[in-house]
Image (tube, helix red, strand yellow):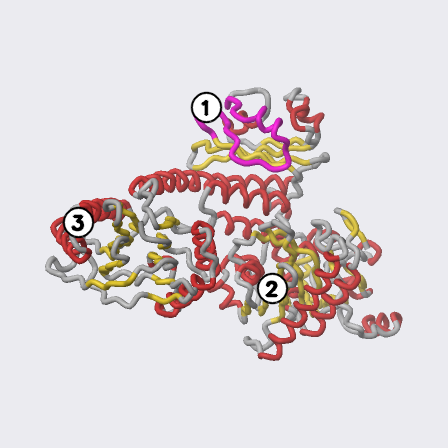
Amino acid sequence: MSRAGGPAVGDGELDAEFAETVRRTGASIGALFRLGPEEQVLRLHLLCGAPAEFAAPWVRVPMAAPAPVAVAVREDRMVWVGSQEQMARSYPRTAMVLPFPLALVAAPVSGARRWGSLLLIWPATRPPYMTARERGNIASSCRRLARLLDDADALGRDPVGGDAPRVVAAGTGRSRGPAMAAADFAERLPGGSCAMDLEGRLTYVSSGACELLGCDASLLLGTLPWQSLRWLDDPTYEDRYRAAVISREPVSFTACRPPGHWLDIHLYPDASGISARILPSGAQPPSLPPTDPSARAAAPARAGRLYQLTHLAAALTEVVGVQDVIDLVADQIMPAFGAQGLVLSRADAGRLRITGHRGYSRETIERLDGLPLDTDFTPAGRALGSGIPAFFADPEEMRRIYPEAPLVSGKQAWAFLPLITSGRPVGCCVLSYDRPHPFPAEERAVLTSLAGLVAQALDRAGLYDTKLELAHGLQQALLPRTLPRVAGLRVAARYVPATRGMDIGGDFYDLIRLGETAAAAVIGDVQGHNVAAAALMGQVRTGVYAHASMGVSPDEVLARTNRLLTDLAADLFTSCLYAHLDLARRRVTLACAGHPPPLLRLPDGTTRPVDLVPGPLLGIDPDAVFPVTELPLTPGVMLAFYTDGLVETPGVDLDESIAGLARHLGAADDRDLELLIDALLDKARTSGQGTDDIALLLLHYEAGP
């Protein structure tokens, strides 16, 4: 077997194992998604039990997407969705494009590396839970698939292959019986009988069906009903077929064959295809879609295209920054419309500034970047000024109006989509093709609608990026640019903002040099994620620094800072941990105001939280007392100070999270503190944290001065 992108040796074994997995689990539909090396996108590689068109919205799934197949790989766990209600609660975007009663499981396929995930779908008639045996069988199947991929990779073969998904036959093994006997059976039944494959093409039409449908069998066989019978050309009817294929449950609907012949059509699906029974209807049903072609201004979009548009619209509502918009357009919208090139630009001071692109050389982008909006060099400026999309099916069509434009990129077809929101031009999205590409009316309508959604997402993302840059700039300005050098100490620190949202936090840290033989370390967290929290954080840090520089004890530093905050009446509380390091006496004295305890790592690697008595949060009680704790400083000892963003995980006890952090710190290599911080942060990310800011300060005592 081979396909675009080169030969994929060993596909036969992989296909067979995949098809056997679908058959053995009793799933009606199966899909294998593959993750290429150094990629952050899952690509649909194998599909069983449904036509490839159904899977168009999921040919490429970003690893960060809120979809079961991505979650399974990202979190290395099996994801079970037992009902449509559970799907709507947990994965609303997926539920929008799979609005059918079903159950599914997504399981990671991992061997020598992460290969991707296996997706299995069942009709809703199965129990809404999985047994331990079923989970074990699916996990075993994933391991077998991973071994086949490992073996191909070890032999230098290309186990990922091309981009296009391949449909694998289910191989039910049932005998279909003599063809003529089956035909005679269907002919004896009243009404009409038809058979369709899972692609929707008619494979058998009885004489009774031909009479009821008003069309000869030679014109129907091998065609899609909604294409060969114009009165069925409505997405409502195609959607009924789609529901039958995915749910594997019988579906019925009523349609009118002009001028007034109403027919009841019953679909009975299984793994090999669909049997259809057609009977004259007893009465005209109410509220059916119009059948008069003049009642519609244009031909309706295919149901598959409508589902795809819904999926992309839902995805655009979830993007955050401008780069997210670019990635979504490149990873999902380009493949959905078969484009090979993309240029996404924003209007800025009368010029089009390119913010993202795919499929173009750097020289081409440099030539196109910064063109005036009123340029006649390309249609982008005119499309944005008029608000009317421009479509060019081939270079000759473009050359008649813009003679130089086809020479710039070497592309053969273009769609220039103006991005306009609230009557204001935002930018332009250009999709281009390596071959001439006609743009049917349906595709133009869908692209035009999609451009409006992209415009809103891009405008929103631009505002988000601007605010985020300002917010994080303020945050970083309030943190120390560098930490002072202290003889006998190795130090490293890091501040990591929350992964989502435009809020700024009040996390802070500092290292204060107190002469030649002493230093102070402080870390804290102001309640809230806004400008007020960041401003109060700056005041707390300044207060701690001023009192520490006066040489007062740790408990007095916190007491004085506490009185400052209560006087300010900021209505925000602050946790704080202060440590005085006396390097001459080899002692460290700690005082705590409601902050998580530091971790103490001994020279032999033993790591534990420091047992100290915390005082109340700063800013509550002006007369609060803060107990102190003393510890010896011996060469090789490390102290780790952190904020709660590093250890807090929803549903997990805080003490357990701190103990887990201690184990990870104790097992890590401490020769490079920056790499050690990276390892601790990576551990936090894989544990599901990332909704709060993180500050981390490591102190490694080597020897006294």
Front-lying residue, 49 or 230: 49
Describe the element under mark 2 as helix, strand or loop: strand
Q: Vertical placement of 459 versus 572: above or below? A: above
Specify the amino acid type for callout 2.
Pro
Label 1 neighbourhood size at 10 Å, few (<14), some (14-19), many (20+)? few
What segment is highlighted magenta in the picture?
Answer: 347-373
Expressed as whole percent of the image width and height from the top left, the position of residue 81 reads: 54, 68
Residue 361 visible in the picture: yes
Point out the tag, 3 or 1, that comes first from the N-terminus.
Answer: 1
Label 2 neighbourhood size at 10 Å, few (<14), some (14-19), many (20+)? many
Specify the amino acid type for callout 3.
Gly
Q: Which residue is mark 3?
A: 551
Point out the tag, 2 or 1, that comes first from the N-terminus.
Answer: 2
Q: CA distance from mark 3 to mark 2?
A: 57 Å
Describe the element under mark 3 as helix, strand or loop: loop
Q: Which residue is mark 1?
A: 350
Expressed as whole percent of the image width and height from the top left, the position of residue 29 reads: 67, 66
For residue 108, the mark is 2
Q: Quadrant of the N terminus?
A: bottom right
Point out the tag, 3 or 2, that comes first from the N-terminus.
Answer: 2
Q: CA distance from mark 2 to mark 1?
A: 49 Å
| Residue in view at x 56 percent, y 43 percent | 329
For residue 544, the mark is none
Q: Is residue 233 magenta?
A: no
Specify the amino acid type for callout 1.
Gly
> Hey, which quadrant is residue 143 in on the image?
bottom right
Given contact means CB atoms under 8 Å apart, are the residues at marks 2 and 1 in contact? no
Describe the element under mark 1 as helix, strand or loop: loop
| Residue in view at x 60 percent, y 49 percent | 39
